Each structure stands twice: as structure tokens, then as C-alpha cells.
Image: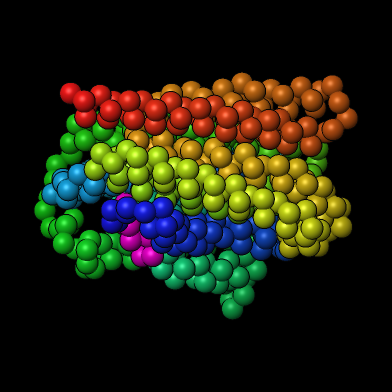
Amino acid sequence: MIETNTLLAKYKQLFILFIPILITQVAMYAMNFFDTTMSGHFSKQDLAGVAIGSSLWFPISTGFGTVLQALTPITAQLMGAKKEKDISFILIQGFYVAFSIAAIIIIVGDLLLKPILHMMQLDPYVEIVAKHYLWALAIGIIPLFIYNVCRSFIDALGMTKISMIITLLSLPLNILLNYLFIFGNFGFPRLGGAGAGFATGITYWIIMMIAICVIHNMKPFSQLYIFRAFYRVSLVKWKEIFSLGVPMGLSTFFEASIFSVVTLFMSKFGTNTIAAHQAAMNFESLLYMLPLSISIAMTITVGYEVGAKRYKDARAYSHIGIFIAILFATVTGMLLFIYRNSVASIYSEDPRVIALTSHFLLYAIFFQWSDAIQAPVQGALRGYKDVHITTIMTFISYWIIGLPLGFMLDAITALGPFAYWIGLISGLGVGAITLFSRLFHIQRKKAINRKKASLA
């Protein structure tokens, strides 16, 4: 990260961070994409099973993973304030937190998985696939969370290309392992959807080990001596991480879990609808990588400028990020409208699933504009370390407005499964408006305080 003094330099800086982050996010999500599509080509029941398993795992992995992303604004602000010596200590505490969270998830998940799946009253084969997929994926939970800490540190230093390279190296291996474990090629066991879980879990171990080696041996990370001293557990630093990370994680969990809950509601409409809904949601989530990547880049840039007390520059980065995200949303929405049938055929060869997926993708177009505002705004707010009120806003938008509206429309109209998508779109829209209002308030408050300080 460097200080920028012109608007053009800020655009350049943001894109230098954004492009590698986007490639990294797409590559990480591509693991789930290939899990889903390759399982779908094994059978539509396996596609449905992986869809259910992913719906249970996604809010947990993203919610708790976002808690660990608290290391990004913390480290970015330390770098902006020229306090590099404090970074090693806070990062090691992040590793301790990551291991602890992962261990708890594994224990609790083992206890609750069977009752949850049984309660959903799924087709017996679909339930078995979902259960085995999650059991297999569990081997990679600890390394995934440790990698999240490594990546937060790497990105906070502005070295987003490193995260990109690590992830790109692992993606072909993940595809190969899917090919071997799902379909049983070259003498490997033919596991179907469960094989996708094994493939992804093994891949998480590999990216964790690569990231640790990079941090230990490559400049500028090695100059911070991350692994060259032993640090005891510091509950004070854990409190700092959790006080920022828990609201961040809850915001992400509220958003991710509502999509998962909607997927569970889809179970009453049959296997074809579950498969089509998951396929459309999978592609929509792939498109979401654009505003999400801008959001992460804005957390880094805004956090760096706030740490250096350059609030005018932080505000400029916020406006640039939102503008770029809206521009991308307009383009991707138009392309999705034109090519939605082609996209649907990627996920399945079943004509009924393709037709339903194409219909769902029409609604996915409207997700683009809401995401283009709410995701970058959340990233900017995290750069300011303003996360508590936004958590409440997110909960109200998705769970008090979005989900009940979808449930009501399903009850009183003939929209069927599409009623829930309308509810989601409405919740996202309300979230975008309220979060933008909060960002405006924070920036105005910083500007007033800065003016008072200069007059004092």
C-alpha cells in the first residue's frame, strides 16, 4: 500500500488490489462451482445432495471466515499508522482463534448434522449424499480457517497477487481430485457427491501449507518475523479480534444463512426445483465475487487511509468502489439476461432442470444492483472499523423483511419457489439503502471531527 494524491492514482491503486482479489475469490468459489457442476453430471440426486450440504456449510464457513477477516482492517490500520512491530503478535493470535473456532465447528457439527438432515425429510439418497459430502469436507475445516488468517494478513499488506497465485495453483488440483473421487477414475473410489467433499478438503490443506511457507520465507512478510517468536494466548487481543470480527461475521452469516434457509424451503418443491435453485444461486454467487472483491479492496484501502488519519482519501476510495461495482452490475445483468439458457445448461443435462434454472436466473439479474451497493459499502465500513450497527441493519433487512416477505408471497400467490427470490431481492435492496446511509453518516462525522481538530 502507498499513499495516493490524485483520483487517477486511487483508481489505479484500487484496481491493483481488486483484480488479484477478484481472481482469488473466483478461484476459491470455483471449488464450490466445480463441486456442484461435476456432481450434477454424476446424477441430479447427487447435485441435490451437494446443494443441501453446501447450503448448510456455506453460512458457517463464510460467517466464521469473516470473523477471521477482522485481521485485514486491523493489520491495514497498523500499517497505515506505521506500527509494523505489532503485526506479528496479532497475527499469531489470529491463528489461535482460527484453530479454536474450527475445532468447535467440527465437534458441534458432528453432533447436529444427522438430526438436521433427518428433520428436512429429504429423499433418502439425497440425505446420504449431503451427509457424506459434509463429513468428507470436514477434513479441511482447520486448514481453511488458518488459510483465511494468512490471506487476511497477505492482503492487508497490499500483496493481493500472492493470494491470487496460491489459489490459482490449487484450483487445477481441486478439479483433478473431483474427477478422481466423484467419478472413480484411475482406480480411485467412485464416491459421487461425497467425493467432491474429499477433493475440496484436501485442497484446503495444500493452500494452507503454501501460504505459511510464503509468509515465512518471502519478503515483505518475512521481514515481520511472524513465526520466529513464541507468543502466549492473549485474551486481550482475542477480544480485539472478536469485537470487530464477530459483528462482521454475523453480518455475513445473516446474509449467507438466509440463502441457505431459502434452499431448505425449496425442498418441498421437489428435487428438480432444489437442483435448479442451487444451480442459479451458484452462478449468482459467482457473479457476487465482483462486488465482494471490490469490498475487500475497499477494506484495505479505507483501513490504510483511516489508520493514517487521511479521512478525505478514505471517502474518495468509498465513492470510487461503489461506482465501479454499479458499472460491473449493469454489464453482468445484461449478459445474464441474454445468455441465461446457456448458463443453465452448464449445470445439468435434464431439460426440466435447465428450464427452471433459466427462470431463476431472470430474478438473479436484480441481485446485481443491490449487491453493487451493499457489498462495497460494507467493505468501506469495515475499513472504518464500524461494524456493530451495520450488523443490526443486515439482520433486519434479510430476516425481518426479506425472508418473511418471501414466505408470505409463497402463501398468498402462485409464485411458488420464485416468491422466495423476490423476498431476497427486497431484503438486499433495503440492506443496500440502510448501509449506504450509515456510511454517509460515518464519513460526515469524521469530516466534522477533523475540522474541529484543525480549528482547535
Q: Position of residue 15 (x, y in %)?
A: 45, 59
The quadrant holding residue 246 is: top left
Q: Which residues are magenta?
A: 154-163
Q: Residue at image x 54%, y 27%?
A: 434
Q: Nearer the viewer, residue 297 or 139?
A: 297
Question: For residue 161: magenta?
Answer: yes
**From the image, which quarter does the N terminus lie in?**
bottom left
Q: Residue at x 16, y 62 (%)?
A: 223
Name the dominant secondary structure of the magenta segment.
helix
Residue 433 to residue 335: above or below: above
User: Furthest residue to the left?
Assistant: 229
- In the rendering, at what x and y percent does residue 139 appear? 44, 54
Residue 390 counted in the magenta span:
no
Q: Residue 4 at x, y = what percent?
A: 32, 54
Q: Please tell me whether residue 234 is drawn above or below residue 36 in the rendered image.
A: above
Question: Residue visible at 19% across and 63% down?
Answer: 222
Question: From the viewer's perspective, is 90 left or right of 40?
Answer: left
Residue placed at 66% from the left, 63% from the top? 38
Q: Quadrant of residue 451?
A: top left
Residue 444, compared with residue 335, is above or below; it is above
Left or right of residue 149: residue 402: right
Q: x, y (%) of residue 43?
A: 74, 59
Residue 57 visible from this viewpoint: no
Q: Is residue 349 visible?
A: yes
